[in-house]
Amino acid sequence: MRASVKDGVGVFTPQGFLDGNSAAALLSIEDIQATTKLNADMVLVSLKKVVFFNRNGLDTFVKMFAKVRESKNVTVGFCDYDLKKYKAILNFYRGDVNFSLFASQDIAHLFAPSFNNKNLNVLLYSEDKSQRSAMAIELHDGGHNPIITQTEEEFIAKQNAENAYDVIIENTYLGQMGQNVSARVTGNAIIYTVTSFLDAEIGNMFNIAYHNNSLNVGFRLFIFDAYKVVSMNVHALNFFSRLASSAAEYNATICFVGMTFEKTPITFKENMEDSGIMFFDQMENILGDKEILNELGASSAAAVQNKRAINKVTVTELPSFIDATVATIEMMTNSRAVKETAQIHAIKIEDHQDKIASSIGFYGDIDGMVILIFPKDIAKKACQLLIGEETDDLDLILDTLAELVNIVGGKVKTLLSNHKVNVNITLPRTYPDIDSLLEIAQDRKGVQVDLSFDNDKFLFFLTR
Amino acid sequence: MKFNTKKWLLLITNEKINTFIDKIPPAPQALRATISLLNSGELVKASQIAQTDLALKSYLKNIVNKPVYGFKTEVSEVSQIFGILGVSSSQQTVYNYMMTLLSPKKWELFHLRESTFNELQAKLSRKWKQILQHLNIDDMDIESAITLLPASIIVAEALFAEKKDDVALLRSVNDLDFNTILSRLCGVDLFDICEKISIKWEMPKKIAHIVQASSGCKPSEDEELNTLGKWMHLLLFYELSQPVFIEASLNDFIEFQLDYVADIYEDFAKLMEIS
């Protein structure tokens, strides 16, 4: 059994009866290895569809949690349970719960670094005082407003207040939380979360290939969420200075938010500022101010280094890219594609109205970016299989489009590996209109393929 | 630069479903005659007809001698088998055989072999009988209803096998089961196709109604049939939680509806001695 990954959270969903035998059959050694390689900040096992479990059944997953944490320091645990199941788990592992328990996936997402719906009013209660505090700190650091209740009576009274809270948390337990440098996308900025003591280890924890390719895809603003950083040494200082220099070549900006210099020499701050790194006290000072966002480059993309020509190696693999895209869109829309034209030039979009787009970068043996431009109606149709109903909610469509482009990326990866070309893929990026796409793509030369799905035009663009 | 979009088949289409249904052969004459005689309680005559179908005879012998039936000595004659099973279970076993006529020679989507599929049929049948006894239900058609349930697995295999990699990719980002994918793309689900099979094979209507309810997605308005649907849904997932069927990738081929079975779970757990 494999986890499905959405918004940086990998979820296993076993069904039915979970005992030692069934859990062992559900989770092979290959499954565990694949989980350790997942690009996820959190790995959870949902108990939503489990009607019966025992300690042996959970143990198989708890062992998998340990292996995942050994190789990647991410948050692991169970989710989607009722009070009876919650009590049973705590009873099984009395005093030795080294994983997290989230009553629902929505609650788990609040604690995931990739969660981007911030500033929620969260009512929380736990019998354990230290748990109440731990949750409140995590939620606060994540940009939410936690409201802690000290007693069950107070909690019951408050949770009955209509519309007072966005989320209510109970029957939840925080085990060890992830400490990798996780990345999330907020609008057009990438936010990295760094914690505790920053030293030479930052070079290992930070995914430099991912960062470089995010630059290549067109991201221009990188924010380090440093609220939980205690101190930094000279090795980390050098690392960030080098990062700032390379970002400058792309006209990109690096910011630190929430970093205090109580235990770090203030001269480090000056050195970092000299390298071009900017400091802000609050995340809201950046994300909540459109003018500053524009100044910092979150909406523009002067791609100084990016005007790289599409090369022969990438063009040779074009059929794999087209096949992956066409197959995925055909699968999702249940309609056939017809290729109309294929030409090498800068991206040309005749009609900008009612179109949305998505892009995904790839890097490894070859590198580049695939851009897909959809008429809104095709995008809606393509997303219907994943959403389950028709919708006009643009945010939901864009969110689902990102999943779809992830499928395209996964298929590209598989098809290229059949040709012995190994690549990794970046997080997908979506664009609510063509103007925002052109900010990063209009000067790029690439292969443009016009396709038609049931007479609706669809555009594929492959560039570097 | 070369690429060919035509080589990509669509995931699933209504045409493909219709072709599958069209290709379902009518029930062979010997089987129809056997079932008809069993319906009239003519065990001896039924066994004489069944004896003429060598494949059926071999199936009956193979199934009845599985450990789940618990016979100490080998049973080999059809008349002996029907005699031991009785009218209801004989009819149920003949229907189970009919289902195997639809199953593929080689399973691609699910890691199944003929013997594993037969084992699933046998386990479901034995436990269904146990459930009906517990519920004090003595009805030949209801007893045979369980035989249509594994047809949903055969249908999923037939429709999705050639696109299994695409389905796996789709499921890597969104935890969709085969029933939901089919329903969202084509407006019919695996259980609707099972019903079509039952119509083609002239099975009693009650059988299709119970199996539709057992999908967990379409509760029956008839309270009795709906309760039976719940028991069947839970029984299916009880069996699909066995390691051999998990390894066959059957555990998540449809979605388990926990809420649907919540009110019968305690009773079921007691009957199956789950602790």
Image (spheres, rainbow, N blue to C red):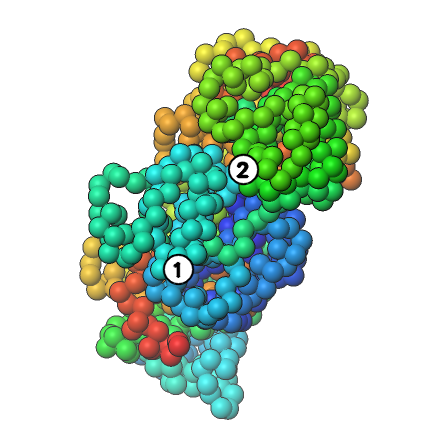
Mark 2 surroundings within 10 Å by alpha-carbon count, few (fewer than 14), some (14 through 19), many (20 or more): many
Secondary element type, mark 1: loop
Which quadrant would residue A362 be assigned to in this image? top right
- Among the two numbered marks 1 and 2 on one chain, the one whose residue lies closer to the N terminus: 1
| Mark 2 chain | A
* Side of A201 relative to B160 (left or right): right
Which residue is pictured at 25% across the width and 75% down the height? B135
For the residue marked with disc 2, what is the amino acid?
Answer: Tyr
Image height of A139 relative to A300, above or below: below
| Mark 1 chain | A
Secondary element type, mark 2: strand
Image height of A53 relative to A44, above or below: below
> Are the residues flagged by discs 1 and 2 from a single subunit?
yes
Number of numbered markers: 2
Which residue is pictured at 34% across the width and 39% down the height? A121
Which residue is pictured at 78% across the width and 34% down the height? A365
**Labelled disc at residue A205:** none
Quarter of the image for the N terminus of chain A: give it.
bottom right
* Side of A213 relative to B206 (left or right): right
Where does residue A354 sit, x and y in percent of width and height? 44, 16
Q: Is residue A318 visible?
A: no
Q: Nearer the viewer, residue B13 or A203?
A: A203
Where does residue A380 sit, x and y in percent of width and height? 43, 27
Name the residue that disc number 2 marks.
A227
Which quadrant would residue A313 be assigned to in this image? top right
Where does residue A309 sit, x and y in percent of width and height? 75, 16
Name the residue that disc number 1 marks.
A128
Could you tell me if the residues under marks 1 and 2 are in contact, i.e. CB atoms within 8 Å? no
Q: Nearer the viewer, residue A61 or A372?
A: A61
Q: Residue furthest top?
A: A350
For the residue marked with disc 1, what is the amino acid?
Answer: Asp
